[in-house]
Amino acid sequence: MRHLLIGSLLLIASDVLVAQTTPVHEGPAEDITAILDQSRALSEAYMAGDIEALVAVYAEDGIAAPGGRDFVRGYDALYDLWELPEGRVVTYHHATPEELKVHGDFAYDWGYYGGTVVQDGGEPVSFRGKYLVVWQRDADGVWRIAHDMWNSLPAED
């Protein structure tokens, strides 16, 4: 009986671990693909230093909520938020959704992000954190970020 109980607990624990590492995508496949493409476009624009393309992923009235800062609203403020300091280069950036669910013209996406920056040609510095994004399908049919919230996590050893 004891072995059965221990085996059952291990099975439940493994199911929980799998649930935490296997992304959940719910909704029409074309919407999931479009949102994931937009997320990649944001990362690619960030790495290219193309802040206009990065901000274009946001809705016209998009709002960002970076950790430790007040809300950032609208194109001009978002541009200022994302503009890189002189000498800084983002060499790698990615977002890894844990869950992405589409509900009509809105979707939510939460997960982890990470990347690497170099300042003035120095040593690469890694960063990581967690995020929550609310997407909306605009009148032109394009998925854009309506609300974007993130905060950093301690660097991994």
Image: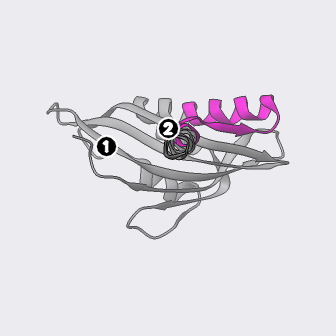
- Answer above or below: position of 72 versus 128: below
- Numbered mark located on residue 127 in the image: 1
Q: Residue furthest front?
A: 1
Q: Position of residue 113 (x, y in %)?
A: 44, 42
- Answer above or below: position of 28 versus 84: above
Which residue shows up at 82% across the image and 39% down it? 141
Q: Which residue is mark 2?
A: 95
Q: Position of residue 154 (x, y in %)?
A: 28, 51
Q: Quadrant of the N terminus?
A: top right
Residue 22 magenta-drawn? yes
Q: Quadrant of the C terminus?
A: top left
Q: Residue furthest left?
A: 122
Residue 97 lies in quadrant: top right
Report whether 69 appears left or right of 18.
Answer: left
Specify the principal SS of the magenta part.
helix
Q: Amino acid at mark 2?
A: Ala
Residue 87 lies in quadrant: top left
Q: Residue furthest bottom?
A: 70
Which residue shows up at 68% across the image and 36% down it? 35
What residue span does the magenta drawing correspond to? 17-40
Badge 2 crowding class, 10 Å Cα cut-off, few under 14, some 14 to 19, many 20 or more, is many
Which residue shows up at 27% across the image and 38% down it? 126
Which residue shows up at 67% across the image and 53% down it? 60
Residue 41 lies in quadrant: top right
> Helix, strand, or loop for circle 2?
strand
Residue 149 magenta-drawn? no
Q: Position of residue 5 (x, y in %)?
A: 54, 47
> Helix, strand, or loop for circle 1?
strand
Badge 1 crowding class, 10 Å Cα cut-off, few under 14, some 14 to 19, many 20 or more, is some
Q: Amino acid at mark 1?
A: Phe
Q: Position of residue 42 (x, y in %)?
A: 53, 37
